[in-house]
Image (cartoon, helix red, strand yellow):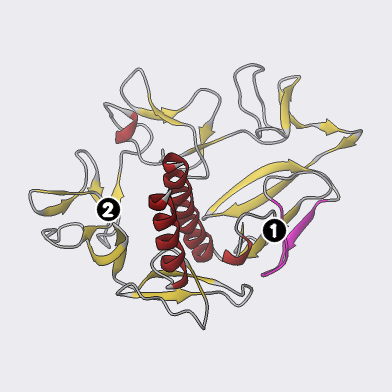
Amino acid sequence: MIKTVSVLLSLFVSSYAATLGTVCDSSNTCTTTNTYCYQQSACTKGVCVCNGGYVASGGICVQERLIGDSCTTGVCIAGSCTGGTCQCQSGWTTAGDRRRCIGKTLGQSCTTVADCQGTYEAYPTGIRCGTDSTCQCQVGYKAYDSYSCIWYGDGESCQAGTTVCAPGTAECSSNVCSCLTLTNTKYVWQMFTRNGYTFGYCVHPSATENVGYGETCTKSDFSANGRFCASNLVCSQCPENYGTSIYECLNGVEAMKASFLLLSIVAILSIIKIMN
C-alpha cells in the first residue's frame, strides 16, 4: 500500500511539474530539459514536447540524428543505429533530406512485407509482398500511388467476396461498388483529404463537412450526426478533454502530440493496475 501511494504521489508531482508528455499551460512551465509547452489557441491546455532538433527517448529529449550521422549519442529519426551510424534497413534507400527511408515500390522485388514502403501509412493500406516476391496490393485493393494501395469507391467495378469497397459504408452489388442504404437513407460518396492522401467514404447526405478549426467533430461517424473536419485539419482532442468524448478539429501537429500523451497515460495506468 505504501509503495502504491508513493508511486501515485510521484505521478502527481510529475504531472504538476509538467514533464515531457504531460499536460501544461502558461502557469505550469515544462521542466524537462529541451522541452516547451505546445498549445493551440483552440485549447486551454497544452502538452510538453521536445524542442526542434530533439526527439523523445526514455522520458527525455535527445538530439535527433539524420541518416548517415553518427549515433553514438542522440537518436536516429529514421532507420536504426548500425555500426555507430544511422542507416536505413537493407533494401531501403535514403530520402534527399536524410530524414526518411524509402522502401520498395509496387512491382519491385521483396522478401517480406517489411521491404515494401507504405505498410505503415494510416491512409491508404493494403500492400503486401506477393507470392511472386514483388510488392503488390492485397487482394481486393487497387494501387493508390507507386507505394500504397486503397479500397474501391462508389461506382467502380468490383467482384463480390473479393473487392474491398469503402469499409463499412459501401458494398459490391451487381459487380459495382455502391454506397449502402442505412435506416432508409441512401448514403452518398464524399472525398476526403487526410495526411496528404485523398480517399472516399459513403456518408449520410445530412452529415456536416468542412468543419472549421476549434469546432467539434466526430470520429468515424458517417451518419447524419457526422461532423468532418476541413481537409487541413484532424479530428483530435485538446489535452484538457482526454478521457472524454469531446473532439475538435485541430491541426496535424496537435494530433501527433495528443497521440504521444495518450500513450504515456496508458503506460502509467498499466503500471498502477499491475501494482494493485
For residue 110, the mark is none
248 horizontally vs 72: left or right: right
Along the line of sight, the residue nearer the viewer: 134 or 222 = 222
Image spot of residue 52 (x, y percent): 33, 73
Name the residue: 69% across, 58% down.
Answer: 246
C-alpha gap between disc 2 and disc 1: 33 Å
Image spot of residue 83 (x, y percent): 7, 48
Q: Residues within 10 Å of mark 2 (few under 14, many from 20)?
A: some
Q: Secondary structure at mark 2?
A: loop
**Amino acid bearing label 2:** Ala
- Against 113, is 13 above or below? below
Name the residue: 63% across, 62% down.
Answer: 241
- The region drawn magenta spans 207-218
Farthest right residue in view: 184
39 horizontally vs 114: left or right: right
The residue wearing badge 1 is 246
Secondary structure mostly seen in the magenta stretch = loop
The residue wearing badge 2 is 78
Residue 216: within the magenta? yes
**Amino acid bearing label 1:** Ile
Name the residue: 28% across, 50% down.
Answer: 101
- Against 32, is 179 above or below? above
Farthest left residue in view: 83
40 horizontally vs 160: left or right: left
Sequence-first disc among 2 and 1: 2
Residue 148: within the magenta? no
Image spot of residue 162 (x, y percent): 59, 18
